[in-house]
Amino acid sequence: MTKKLLHKTSKSYLLFTIILLVITAPAFYYVIQNLYLEDIDEGLELHKDEFLKYSSNQLKETDISSWNRYNREKKILENLYIKEDIFFYKNYYDSLSEENEPYRELYAPVFIEGKPYALSVRENVVVSEDLLISIFIIYTFLLSFLLLGLFFINKRLSANLWKPFYQTLGQIERFEIDKTNQPQLPKTNIEEFNRLNQSIEKLIEKNTSIYRNQREFVENAAHELQTPLAVFQAKIDMLIQNSDFTQKQFEILSSLNDSVFRLNRLNKNLLLLSKIENDNYSEKQIISLNDAMEKNFGFLLNRQKRRT
C-alpha cells in the first residue's frame, strides 16, 4: 500500500514529537525535583548554621525540653549520636491538616554544654511537590502545544511547498502523446521543481517529435508500398494464368503469391492504423470482436482449403 510523501514525512515528525515528549517530560521533572531538593537541603543547613551560631552556645541541658516545645520544625534529640549530617525523607502527622505529610529532614551533630546531641531540622515538602507537579504540567502542556504547533505548521507549509509538484503530476497524468494538447506545467520559485518541469518539457517535446516522425514514416511507407505491391501481385497473377511451367515453378509462384498477399494485408493494416491515429473516421460504431474474428478466420480457412 503506497503512501503520500507528505504523510510519510508528517508521520516521522509526529513520531519524533511523541518520543521527544516522552523522554524530556520525565527528565525535566527529575531535574526540577533535584533542584528543589538542593534548595531545601540548603535551607535546612542554613537553619542548622543559625542554631549553631546563635543558640547552641547559650542553650542549657535543662532548657532542651522547653526549647523543643516552642520550636515546631527544630528538635534536639537525646541519645542519638551521629558524626555527620544526614538527609532523608520521613512522614509526620500534621495536626493542622490532620494527615501524614512528607518532610525533608536533617540530622546534624551538635554539642550542648560539651555533651553530644542531634539536631533535627525538617521542612514540609508538600508545597514543593505540588509546585513541582504544577510546573511539570505547565511544561508538558507548553511543550505539547509547541510541538503540535510546529507539526501542523510544517504540514501546512509542506502542503504549499509540494503543491507545484502535484500540479505537475496531474498534468503528466492527463497528457496523451497522440493528442495536440501540451501540458501546461506550473511556474514556481523553487529551483528543484523548476528543474523538474524543464526536464519534463524537454522529454515531452523530444518524445512527441519522435512519435510524429514515426507516424509520418509509417503513413508514407504504407502509401509508397501500395503501388509496387499491386504491380507485383498483378505480374504474379499474369504469370500463373498465361505461362506453362513445371510443378516446382508453380510452387515457387504460389509461395510468392502468398507472401505478396501477406504484405498487402500488412500494408492495409498500416494504412488503417494511420487513418485511426489521424482520426479520419468521423463516424464510430460498436462492433463485436468475436464476430469479426470468426468472420476473418473463416475467410482465411476457406481460402486455404481452396488452395489445397
Image: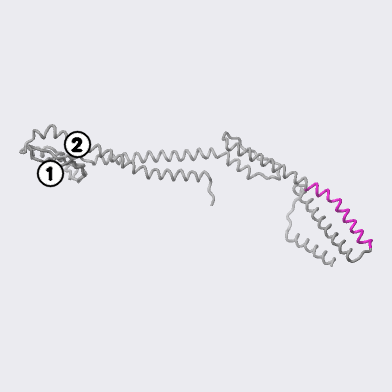
Tell me the residue at 26%/38% (across/down): 36
**Residue 285 x/y as whole percent:** 74, 53
Q: Is residue 129 left or right of residue 58?
A: right
Q: Earlier in the sequence, mark 2 or mark 1?
A: 2
Residue kind at label 2, given as amino acid type: Glu
Tell me the residue at 19%/36% (across/down): 45
Residue kind at label 1, given as amino acid type: Tyr
Classify 150 as above or below 291: above
Q: Count of labels shown?
A: 2
Tell me the residue at 94%/62% (across/down): 243
| Residue 296 visible in the shown view | yes
Q: Nearer the viewer, residue 176 or 190?
A: 190
Boundaries of the magenta span: 218-243
Q: Is residue 61 magenta?
A: no
What residue sits right under mark 2 in the picture? 45
Residue at disc 1, secondary structure:
loop
Classify 49 as above or below 223: above
Look at the image and name its color scheme: one colour
Which of the labelled discs sits on residue 275, or is there none? none
Determine the image quadrant of residue 17. Answer: top left
| Residue 99 visible in the shown view | no
**Disc 2 versus disc 1: distance between alpha carbons?**
18 Å
Determine the image quadrant of residue 80. Answer: top left
